[in-house]
């Protein structure tokens, strides 16, 4: 950790208390000048953090953040674990270094300056508020046999959160995780390299943990976060999730999607509901009948069953 972030973490620890802390007290505690403290606090807004400032009282974070314990994280994960306070994108980092990676290696960051979601959308990544990570995996098969992988990753995330007593979870095809019918987490899988008999993928995922009001206003869809049920320990969550992801991806490699379909069906938000399937410029209306063993969504239209799969398909409830 560089000195830049060491100082900021010390300040954030002081700003995370229930009461306001004066600039003088912060400067005295960490051995900086009052001006240097002001500069660090002003810079926090650049990382998506909102700090309350009250004259005569001092400073306090508008909403609590939870940071990773780096030593506990690295000690709890068997594979190589790359941890950053700040990075452009965890997916980009893994894509740039995939030649040197082994299946199960993971990159985790507290802040992404260029986080992205599906279809090129921006993924807002304020410092410390949420979980941002990317896992590398090398498959001994071609990409056409991996169509259901994003569903497996969604199942693994929901399973891990359920084990931590999070309730009200659901999944939306093809790979979104919801909490109380609002988006909680997303997945972005990108190809590092593919050959006839081998495919190397970077599996990125983000989970909302504690969204500030200011950041929430920037999101163009209903969202949820884990703070509504008590923010879990981020380090423990990552260690457990990494373990489940490795186990589930290996099971998928050996047995395909079939073993995961019952779990998906139990959490499918649109099971047996009327849906509209968007495939620009076309639309399909019908009943959602779950997924098949290739990961396609099954839609019943006019007593006819059809399956649909593809990167530009969006599923909306009616």
Image (cartoon, rainbow, N blue to C red):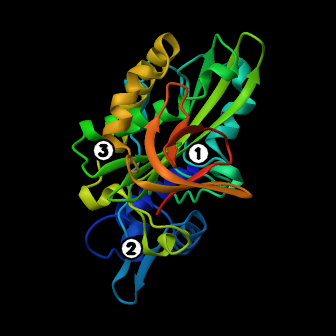
Q: Count residues near mark 3 (Cα–Cα under 10 Å), then give few for <14, some for 14-19, many for 20+.
A: some
- Assess whether mark 2 and mark 3 are in contact (beta carbons under 8 angstroms): no
Residue that mark 3 sits on:
233
The quadrant holding residue 21 is bottom left
Report the residue at 58% width, 45% height from top. 2
Which residue: 62% across, 40% down? 90
Q: Is residue 62 visible?
A: yes
Image location (x, y in percent) of residue 85: 55, 47
Q: Which residue is labeled 2 in the image?
A: 62
At horizontal 40% and vertical 37% (from top left) the residue drawn is 157
Residue 133, visible in the rendered structure: no
The mark nearer the N terminus, 3 or 2, is 2
Labels 3, 1: front one: 3
Secondary structure of the residue carrying tag 1 is loop
Q: Which residue is nearer to you in this view: 286 or 199?
A: 286
Quadrant for residue 72, please give it: top left
Viewer-nearest of labels 1 and 2?
A: 2
- In the rendered image, residue 4, in percent from the top left (x then y), is placed at 58, 53
N-term mark: 1 or 2? 1
The crowding category of the residue bearing disc 2, from other C-alpha atoms within 10 Å (few below 14, some 14 to 19, many at least 20), is some
- Residue sitting at x 38%, y 44%: 268
Mark 1 and mark 2: Cα distance apart in space: 25 Å
> Separation of disc 3 and disc 2 at Cα?
19 Å
Which residue does the numbered mark 1 point to in the structure image?
2
- In the rendered image, the vertical position of residue 68 relative to residue 76, given as above or below: below
Q: Secondary structure at mark 2?
A: loop
Can you give x and y, in whole percent of width and height, for residue 318 in the image?
Answer: 46, 63
Is 246 or 7 nearer to us in this picture?
A: 246
């Amino acid at each position: 950790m560089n000195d830049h972030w060491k100082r900021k973490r010390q300040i954030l620890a002081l700003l995370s208390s229930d009461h306001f802390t004066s600039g003088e007290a912060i400067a005295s505690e960490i051995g900086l000048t009052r001006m240097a403290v002001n500069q660090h606090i002003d810079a926090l807004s650049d990382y998506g953090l909102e700090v309350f400032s009250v004259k005569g009282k001092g400073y306090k974070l508008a909403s609590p953040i939870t940071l990773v314990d780096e030593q506990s994280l690295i000690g709890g994960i068997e594979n190589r674990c790359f941890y950053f306070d700040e990075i452009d994108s965890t997916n980009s980092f893994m894509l740039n270094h995939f030649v040197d990676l082994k299946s199960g290696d993971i990159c985790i960051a507290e802040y992404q300056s260029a986080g992205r979601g599906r279809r090129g959308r921006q993924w807002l990544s304020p410092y410390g508020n949420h979980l941002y990570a990317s896992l590398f995996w090398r498959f001994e098969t071609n990409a056409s046999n991996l169509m259901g992988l994003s569903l497996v990753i969604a199942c693994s995330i929901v399973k891990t959160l359920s084990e931590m007593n999070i309730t009200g979870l659901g999944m939306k095809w093809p790979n979104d995780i919801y909490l109380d019918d609002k988006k909680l987490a997303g997945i972005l899988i990108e190809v590092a390299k593919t050959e006839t008999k081998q495919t190397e993928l970077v599996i990125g995922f983000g989970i909302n943990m504690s969204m500030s009001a200011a950041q929430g206003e920037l999101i163009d869809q209903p969202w949820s976060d884990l703070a509504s049920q008590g923010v879990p320990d981020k380090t423990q969550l990552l260690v457990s999730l990494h373990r489940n992801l490795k186990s589930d991806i290996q099971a998928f490699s050996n047995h395909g999607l079939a073993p995961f379909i019952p779990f998906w069906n139990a959490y499918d938000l649109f099971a047996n509901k009327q849906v509209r399937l968007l495939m620009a410029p076309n639309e399909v209306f019908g009943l959602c009948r779950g997924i098949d063993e290739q990961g396609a969504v099954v839609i019943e239209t006019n007593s006819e069953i059809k399956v649909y799969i593809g990167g530009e398909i969006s599923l909306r409830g009616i």
